[in-house]
Image (cartoon, rainbow, N blue to C red):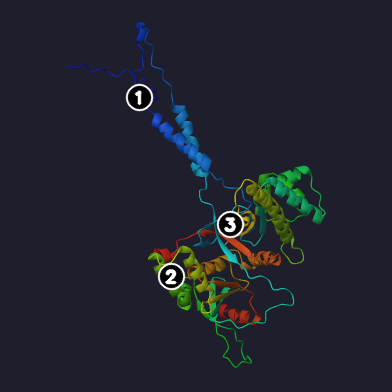
Amino acid sequence: MAQIQDTGGQDHKGGKKRPKRGIPTVDMTPMVDLAFLLLTFFVMTSTFSKPKVMSLVYPAKPEPGQENKNSEINNAVTFLLSEDRIFYYQEMFYPEGNDKGKPATQLEETDFSPQGVRKLLTNLNRFVLEKKAGYDQELKRGQIADSTYLRLVREAKGDNAALKVLIKTDDMATCGNFIDLIDELKIADIGVIAPVDITADELKLVKAKTDK
Amino acid sequence: MAKISKPKSAPAIDMTPMVDLAFLLVTFFMLSANFRTDEVVQVDTPSSISEMTMPENVVLITVDQGGRVYFGVSGKEEAKQNLLKRMSEKYKIPFSPEQIATFGSLTDFGCTIQEMPAFLNMTGDERKRFVSEGKTMAIPTDSTNNQLKDWINFGNMEMLAVGEKAYFEAKDRGLEPNINEFKPKFVLKVDSKAEYLYAKKVIETFRDLKLSNLNFITSLEADPRKAQ
């Protein structure tokens, strides 16, 4: 089958006539077989891409005796995760009959679809997204440098008017729910993400919703 | 009239280019191959849009579907062996040199330190069965018996030592290395079906150790912002 073809190369100088030998042939078939076997093996076993990771910075634990005193947060939304369900409320939490005279916080439900939580976050975080869109344009037109762009976006995300998100989970929530939500927050360019412990009052509200 | 010469033998195909190509590809795949490591559990990771690739020096904590916790560190065998020696001192459990050597070759494991000597005496398949058949509760993360905390803490120390060495070696060679690249990173590999409760215990353990920058392994999904 496989043959190395000897193309010319015979030396006729000097007039010595060698008896014509047969063209040397090497049967390459086994080598080809082996080469393809190895090729198949490496193609099958190699994993090309390194796994991707998503970075998340957790807030540092407060030192004992230095617990923060429930400071007022502007522009916050709190997500409460239960098994494959997601609830949220805006601003601060007010329990039933609180001393500030505010109406008790009601939970609203949304879902993980693009029409659900993504739309909600896009609306709530309009401040940052609009600013970012403006910077995108400027970057495209070459009016600002890359480093300036990154700095401006970071500043916008850290602005007081930017949306801040608290995430609380009950015992039924899965890691998938949690990561999905973080993913949505990253899509919506939320700068401040804080996974925190759920309070008993909030847990009660979630229970009331999920027990139906 | 030209004579029609009859072919003497079967028509020969010159295979040389094909062989060249085959070997070129073999070489490419051999060099680029990044073998799948032999992990103790299969975990179905959630997906995200993050395109950050996994860093080099990692402490990897795996949480499987049942909420059991596994621990692994990347890097040299020596660092892993030192890690086991530290644990052995702390928990007063002696290990033979063979067991320590075996530990150096493990990518990850999930058993209590008390089960560790027996675990290291097993063969690879036995270890897998030991884990998959639920004969162990994996690494305890309870606040009363938080062995994971020690594993992370000592693992971090060992990897910092290795990283520091590599940093100064790079500096001696006249490079300007970034110290942060040599510090270990902390990676969580959670099953998307696992209850967050279990992941939270691991996260709280990290926060107790003042390690708050965590990475979650996710599979890549399309970014909806780019699709527009």
**Foreground tag (3 vs 2):** 2
State the residue at coordinates (57%, 71%). A83
Q: Assign a secondary structure to mark 1.
A: loop
Whole-percent x and y of residue B35? 56, 45
Q: Is residue B48 above or below residue A162?
A: above
| B30 sits to left or right of B38 | left
Check chain identity for marks 1 and 3: say if they share one. Answer: yes
Q: Is residue B130 above or below residue A205?
A: above
Image disc number at residue B43:
3
- Say what amino acid the circle numbered 2 marks: Tyr
| A145 sits to left or right of B206 | left
**Chain letter behind tag 2:** A
Which residue bears the numbered disc 2? A135
Whole-percent x and y of residue A162? 51, 77
Image disc number at residue A46:
none
**Chain letter behind tag 3:** B
Q: Is residue B69 above or below residue A30?
A: below
Q: Is residue B203 above or below residue A30?
A: below
